[in-house]
Amino acid sequence: MLVEISGVCQYCSKQVKVLMMNGEPVGNCTSCDETPFGLKTVKGVIYVVANKNQVGVKVGLTTKHIDQRVKALSSTGVPGRFEKIAIFPSDRPEVDEKKVHEKLARHRLEKEHFNLDPVEAVLKAHRALNYREPIFFDEKLRERFNLLKERGNIEMKLKLSKQR
């Protein structure tokens, strides 16, 4: 597959466009002749999805494209469609999924379904995965996540200052 990627070169900070073929750059930055982007293939993703006709969220893993997984989930005879909330790229998806499920255990409804607000589920997954940043599919949800994360940071600072 041939893909054109544009962005800022990591070495000279100039705007650059590079063709990628099968995950490898075809050519270098025209300004500094370095490989402008670092690329890494991940084994899978931990996902958080929600269905407005169901309580809470589903948190799982996939080694396929998230759109394929959502399509498969939505075609299992459940009413409504699952919507992508966020993903966490992972080199060890089975290990990371287990960490997240352990963090969410007290909210478990059944199997991979948890009685949580979607943004709260992403925040708990973020913490379980050593503060790995999620990739959101909706800007408003990303903004809510950042606000909740900041509120948590402020509350922690207040608790620590009271202990002194």
Image (cartoon, helix red, strand yellow):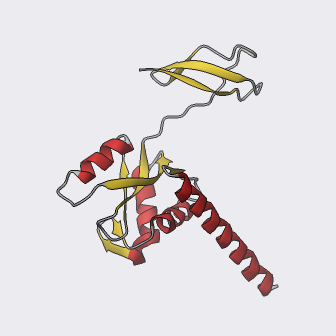
| Screen quadrant of the C terminus | bottom right
Q: In which quadrant of the rendered image does the N terminus lie?
A: top left
Q: In this view, does 107 lie to the left or right of 140?
A: left
Residue lying furthest right = 164
For residue 142, above or below residue 23? below
Residue in the image at 50% along x and 64% along y = 119
> Residue 12: which quarter of the image?
top right
Q: Where is residue 146 in the image (x, y as percent from the top left)?
A: 62, 61
Q: Is residue 71 left or right of residue 40?
A: left
User: Residue 52 at x, y = what percent?
Assistant: 33, 64
Q: Residue at x 48, y 47 (%)?
A: 90
Please count the marks in the image: 0
In the picture provided, is 81 more to the left or to the right than 97?
Answer: left
| Relative height, residue 14 to residue 114 (above, below) | above
* Residue 136 is at least partly visible in this image: yes
- Examine the rendered structure and indicate whether residue 26 appears above or below residue 105: above
Q: Residue at x 26, y 53 (%)?
A: 73
Residue 4 percent across, percent down from the top left = 53, 21
Q: Position of residue 70 (x, y in %)?
A: 32, 49
User: Viewed as shown, does residue 90 lie left or right of 75?
Assistant: right
Q: Is residue 12 above or below residue 146?
A: above
**In this orientation, which residue lies closer to the viewer: 76 or 144?**
144
Is residue 63 visible to the viewer in this orientation of the structure? no
Seen from this angle, which residue lies furthest left? 77
